[in-house]
Amino acid sequence: MTNALPTQDTDRDLVLTRVLNAPRDKVYQCWTQPDLLKQWFAPKPWTTPKVEIDLRPGGASRFTMADEAGTEYPNPGQYLEVIPNERLVFTDAFIGDWAPSEKPFFTAVLTFEDAGPGKTKYTAVARHWSAEDAESHKKMGFHEGWGLCAAQLETLAASI
């Protein structure tokens, strides 16, 4: 397996890349430890009150976000690839142990690369099932929301 990003499909992919002032093992920990993930995953003032992780290919990922009023938005998914400190791939096409979801929306490919002492090049590719889904995610605020979350991720990863 390789740490290479998939060939980008400009109609279906949304990409966020940041150099974070935190080591990649700490950034990876923030993505894979439920107590840490709860602290940064949703753009504030939203929260992430529930996180369940079965960190293996085929394992379920269940992140529940909540808005300011406390309305919860479950996000069930499944890990496809897990390479510690290098790469995580997950999708909402399955909800664990290869059980299909009702409506797949995207697959995320996250890479964590060294970017100098104590720094990580963090790339998140959201690969959608259709150009329409990608456009919908963009209008939902993908770049703004994932950008805010990346800043929250950086702050937490730098502090642990």
Image (tube, rainbow, N blue to C red):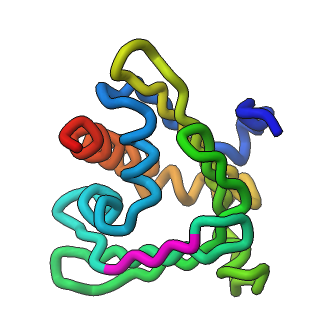
Q: Quadrant of the C terminus?
A: top left
Residue at left 37%, top 52%? 30
Vertical arrangement, residue 41 with respect to residue 51, above or below: above
Q: Looking at the magenta stretch, what is its main secondary structure? A: strand
Residue furthest to the top in view is 116
Residue at left 50%, top 22%? 114
Q: Quadrant of residue 155?
A: top left
Considering depth in this image, is 1 or 70 the residue closer to the camera? 1
- Residue 15 position, x and y percent, is 57, 37
140 horizontally vs 93: left or right: left
In the image, residue 42 lies in the stretch drawn in magenta: no
Vertical arrangement, residue 147 with respect to residue 93, above or below: above
Considering depth in this image, is 150 or 135 the residue closer to the camera? 150
52 horizontally vs 148: left or right: right
In the image, residue 51 lies in the stretch drawn in magenta: yes
Considering depth in this image, is 93 or 51 the residue closer to the camera? 51
- Residue 136 position, x and y percent, is 56, 59
Number of residue marks:
0
Q: Quadrant of the N terminus?
A: top right
- Residue 66 position, x and y percent, is 28, 77
Residue at left 71%, top 47%? 12
Residue at left 45%, top 82%? 74
Q: Quadrant of residue 2?
A: top right
- Magenta segment: 50-54
22 horizontally vs 1: left or right: left
Vertical arrangement, residue 45 with respect to residue 23, above or below: below
